[in-house]
Amino acid sequence: MDNKTLTNYHTHTSYCDGKNTPEEIVLSAIEKGLSAIGFSGHGYTPFDLCYCMKETPSYIQEISKLKRKYGDKIEIYCGVEEDAFSPVQRENFDYIIGSSHYFNIDGQYYPIDSDYEGFKKCLEAFDNDASKLAEVYYSTFVSYITERKPDIVGHFDLITKYDEVDEQRFLNNSEYLKIAKKYLQKAAENDVIFEVNTGAISRGIRKTPYLGEELLYILKEKGSKVMLSSDSHSVDTLDFYFEEAKKLLRDVGFDHVYELHQGTFKKRLI
Ligand SMILES: [Zn+2]
Ligand SMILES: [Zn+2]
């Protein structure tokens, strides 16, 4: 395995809900042989301060310092994981991951992925109808993708997070898959990169990455761009499950992923 092909641009630190400081992450990335590391602190969400960055200027400043200190050993990027409901605050970031983590129902925000109890509350808000929930989730997310065009689309099918924890509401449900595929086809009309995200696997919640295999075939058909990401919240998981995810992508027919190098997204063979 050529370690130099490793990169990860979806990384959380102690500036939001991650465990480690940016410097600890950089040192670990250098040790693992990553050629680039990108930080993606959660963008400001005024309606939910638990997960987001509250000191964004210090985050940006600290990563600038790390670029100067370690720039000869690894490429370092300062990105943000913007929520579909975050205000637009994009200046000073090298790239934007756009993700959807909430439902806004009658002005109240329900987190989708904070924990299983929270997810069940979302489901209750849709009368426990998984298809209704999926329709609202994807239509909101795809409108955001189309209007705000993030560089990278984060965990497109996040609502399937708990499908292996309890009953399978989504992945074995043909009505759900029809909805997800319809909206993914719309999302894929934008020039964005879709991440294949292994974050829930490292947390022991899932056995397969986002997006699900059936949806990856849609991206292949549409000629969409994909990238690997670990959605890492600690130094241990920077390249978690990447070899397996590459194999999955190859099985679907992809022979390359996209990586950010010298400030632009480029193809890398897998
Ligand atoms: Zn996220
Ligand atoms: Zn994330």
Image (cartoon, rainbow, N blue to C red):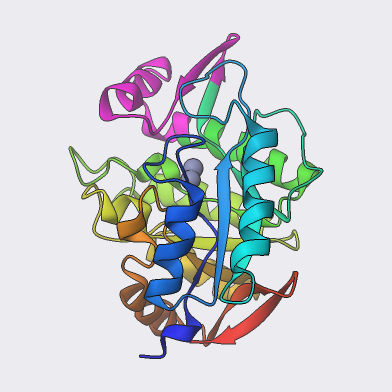
Q: Quadrant of the N terminus?
A: bottom left
In the image, what residue occupies the spot 21% across and 50% down? Answer: 204
Residue 97 visible (yes or no): no
Q: Is residue 129 magenta?
A: yes
> Magenta residues, as a range?
104-133
> Which quarter of the figure has residue 133?
top left
Any magenta on residue 211? no
Q: Nearer the viewer, residue 186 or 72?
A: 72
Q: Position of residue 44 (x, y in %)?
A: 63, 28
Q: How many marks?
A: 0
Which of these two is toward me, 44 or 205? 44
Residue 75, image x, y percentages: 62, 71
Relative to the observer, which residue lies in front, 54 or 245?
54
Residue drawn at (70%, 39%) of the image: 144
Q: Identify which residue is drawn at 39% across, 62% down.
A: 238
Say whether residue 270 is visible. yes
- The x, y position of residue 42, in whole percent, is 56, 37
Nearest the eye: 257 or 253: 257
Residue located 54% across and 77% down the image: 35
